[in-house]
């Protein structure tokens, strides 16, 4: 049977960019014999409008069954007044939590045609291709105790950075496995100089490396130094693995080395299912962009590249993923730009669907 894919377009520009991905999925069926059992459902504000909840139990169950979930974006000003328990973001958080997606993959890749877009010098970013893996389900965003407490005659805000050995082990393995698929080089980042969780993190990652991945070149770096090195000479890195908090900051930093939010894909992976595939959710890094929603201006590339990641990491179609990435690269080299990628004079923007069609044409030519 065909691999299964659940599409959750969501809100704002989510459905607009997902429409372009649907064309590309159709292209793979018609031209490469790659067929998927695609189902589609609501998430976020769209689900709230229909069902009074940002994610129904039925959709949650479906997400647990399929080989991969592809999500557009959730949220919008219309829902800002809602109670926290039914806010659109809660739909996404529930998916991540119940699927136990502990490894967040954030590539930072610089397409040559957009190298001028970076805030860094062109030679520093041209050809850049690194992968940051952020631990996503533990650490200081979840550790107990947490809260705002009374202490004497003032209040104290508390969060707890907490990692168990097994939590570090599993994300470390994600890092080493990724390194084997790429340049065989892994850099682990923490702050073992000032944090106990960092001491344990370093020790566990080193042990997993020594015992299970002696072939992978492992290095350790303090996360603050890592931030400096990422802006000084990012090409020294290949795969970086780090915790939830540092990964949040470092992946945003690395992403912006390479240009627009409209270009950035992501994947969140969990433990292998019975069929050997990891639980997986793919989504663009950007949100629902209410300021441009409904105007045909959204850049669909982040969502298209998220599907390319699904091809590579869920469906064992690395060559087809590369084909799609090369098609995007060709379209950019040909000068196609959605409004968010403008900057050069004399270039007029293409619409969301024109960008999608251009990628299809480049696929035809591949
Ligand atoms: P945003 O990512 O939606 O937009 C930030 C800026 O980037 C806007 O100016 C937007 O027009 C632009 N932009 C984003 N994606 C683009 C694309 N594909 N093409 C062209 N321009 C693009 O972040 P913002 O404005 O902070 O949040 C808007 C809503 O999205 C909020 O409700 C927020 O909660 C939600 N959000 C949802 C996320 C998700 O679904 N994973 C992630 C981030 C925010
Ligand atoms: Mg962030």
Image: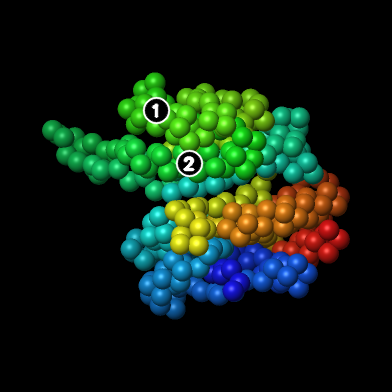
Q: Observer-nearest residue: 322 or 251?
A: 322
Q: Observer-nearest residue: 62 or 295?
A: 62
Q: Is mark 1 within 8 Å of ligand 2?
A: no
Where is residue 128? Give x, y as percent.
Answer: 70, 36
Q: Are marks 2 and 1 in contact (CB under 8 Å)?
A: no
Q: Which image quadrant is residue 235 in?
A: top right
Q: How many marks?
A: 2
Where is residue 79? Give x, y as percent.
Answer: 44, 65
- Sequence-first disc among 2 and 1: 2
Question: According to the image, what is the colour scheme of the structure?
Answer: rainbow
Instruction: Mark 1: give few (<14), some (14-19) or many (20+) Cα within 10 Å.
Output: some
What label does residue 173 carry, if any? Answer: 2
Callout 2 secondary element = helix
The residue where tag 1 is placed is 203
Would you say residue 24 is visible in this rendering? yes
Would you say residue 308 is visible in this rendering? no
Instruction: Mark 2: give few (<14), some (14-19) or many (20+) Cα within 10 Å.
Output: some
Q: Which image quadrant is residue 200 in?
A: top left
**Quadrant of the image for the N terminus?**
bottom right
In the depicted structure, whether residue 249 falls above or below residue 56? above
What label does residue 160 carry, if any? Answer: none
Where is residue 266? Give x, y as percent.
Answer: 57, 51
Where is residue 289? Give x, y as percent.
Answer: 58, 58
Measure how far apart labels 2 and 1 are at the Cα level: 14 Å
Callout 1 secondary element = helix
In the depicted structure, whether residue 337 falls above or below residue 196? below
Residue at image location 46% in from the left, 39% down from the top: 172
362 sits to left or right of 309: right
46 sits to left or right of 28: left
Q: Observer-nearest residue: 95 or 253?
A: 95
Residue at image location 62% in from the left, 43% down from the top: 181
């Amino acid at each position: 049977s065909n691999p299964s894919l659940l599409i959750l377009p969501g809100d704002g520009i989510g459905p607009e960019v997902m429409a372009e991905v649907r064309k590309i999925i159709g292209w793979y069926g018609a031209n490469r014999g790659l067929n998927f059992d695609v189902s589609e459902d609501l998430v976020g504000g769209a689900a709230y409008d229909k069902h009074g909840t940002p994610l129904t139990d039925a959709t949650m169950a479906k997400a647990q069954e399929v080989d991969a979930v592809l999500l557009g974006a959730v949220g919008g000003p219309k829902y800002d007044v809602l109670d926290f328990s039914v806010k659109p973001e809660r739909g996404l958080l529930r998916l991540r939590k119940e699927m136990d997606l502990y490894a967040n993959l954030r590539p930072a890749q610089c397409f040559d045609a957009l190298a001028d877009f970076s805030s860094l010098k062109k030679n520093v970013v041209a050809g850049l291709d690194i992968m940051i893996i952020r631990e996503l389900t533990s650490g200081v965003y979840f550790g107990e105790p947490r809260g705002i407490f009374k202490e004497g005659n003032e209040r104290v805000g508390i969060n707890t950075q907490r990692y168990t050995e097994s939590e570090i082990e599993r994300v470390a393995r994600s890092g080493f496995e990724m390194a084997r698929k790429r340049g065989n080089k892994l850099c682990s980042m923490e702050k073992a100089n000032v944090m106990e969780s960092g001491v344990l993190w370093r020790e566990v990652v080193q042990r997993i490396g020594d015992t299970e991945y002696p072939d992978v070149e492992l290095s350790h770096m303090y996360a603050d130094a890592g931030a400096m090195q990422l802006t000084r000479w990012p090409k020294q890195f290949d795969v970086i693995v780090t915790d939830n908090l540092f990964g949040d900051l470092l992946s945003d930093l690395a992403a912006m080395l390479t240009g627009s939010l409209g270009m950035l894909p992501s994947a969140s992976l969990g433990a292998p299912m019975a069929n050997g595939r990891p639980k997986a959710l793919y989504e663009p890094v950007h949100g629902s962009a209410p300021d441009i929603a409904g105007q045909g201006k959204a850049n669909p590339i982040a969502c298209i590249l998220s599907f390319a990641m699904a091809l590579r990491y869920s469906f064992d179609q690395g060559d087809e993923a590369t084909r799609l990435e090369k098609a995007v690269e060709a379209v950019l080299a040909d000068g196609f730009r959605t409004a968010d990628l403008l900057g050069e004079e004399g270039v007029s923007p293409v619409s969301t669907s024109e960008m999608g069609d251009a990628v299809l044409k480049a696929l035809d030519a591949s």
